[in-house]
Image: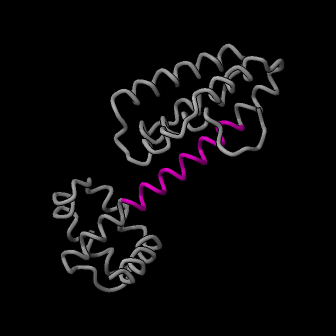
Amino acid sequence: MSEGRGVYELAKVLAVLLVEQGSYSYVDKLSQVSSKDLALYHLREALRDYHSLASRGFEKEEVGELAKTINFEKLEGEIARLKEIAGITQLREEISFVTAQALAEAGRLISRGEYLLARRVLEYLKAQDLLRGDEKEVSKIIRGMAKAISGALGIPEEDLNRIASNERLLKSLIERLRGEK
């Protein structure tokens, strides 16, 4: 299974669950398996939850985009290859590799989501002619206007405070938005 071809379909499923549910439960459960049957059981449960989420629709746009890339034929092959693994050491190695890829993919999704959210906030400030100063000043503006921005954009205040704390991201976005006419 370790063919070095990027993110596995199983890893994508786990990343979708992690980001959409905000829980590491499947990654943790799989990381601690002591047998093949337990690994397959946890994968079945993860896939069941994935299909439940997919049928109701994903709340986070970036999660939905990743979900569209899952190739279920390849996913079936990955599960079949896990079933064929003979020893527990090799099973743990493969599961560790897949869960590590899932964590990396989830990190990418979270980072992308934060970027898109911050961009919406700064575009709102720009439209209101409030995009002034450097990242520190913009951070203060976001904190001071958190309630108004939350109401206007439907973004929870805790997310706005997190964005306001990410001055590196703010600096990058401010430079980009000021470069756009």
- Tell me where residue 46 appears, x and y as whole percent: 52, 25
The main secondary structure of the magenta stretch is: helix
Q: Which of the two residues, 117 or 163, is positioned nearer the viewer here? A: 117
Reply above or below: 90 against 161. above
Reply above or below: 101 against 169. above
In the displayed structure image, the side of residue 120 where residue 3 appears, left or right = right
- Tell me where residue 131 appears, x and y as whole percent: 27, 80
| Among the 4 quarters of the image, the one containing residue 143 | bottom left
Q: Which residues are the magenta region?
A: 97-116
Reply above or below: 136 against 147. below
Q: Residue furthest bottom?
A: 133
Reply above or below: 129 against 61. below
In the displayed structure image, the side of residue 63 where residue 108 appears, left or right = right
| Among the 4 quarters of the image, the one containing residue 162 | bottom left
Q: Residue at x 52, y 24 (%)?
A: 47
| Residue 131 is covered by the magenta coloring | no
Q: Quadrant of the N terminus?
A: top right
| Among the 4 quarters of the image, the one containing residue 51 | top left
Q: Quadrant of the C terminus?
A: bottom left
Q: Which of the two residues, 170 or 144, is positioned nearer the viewer here? A: 170
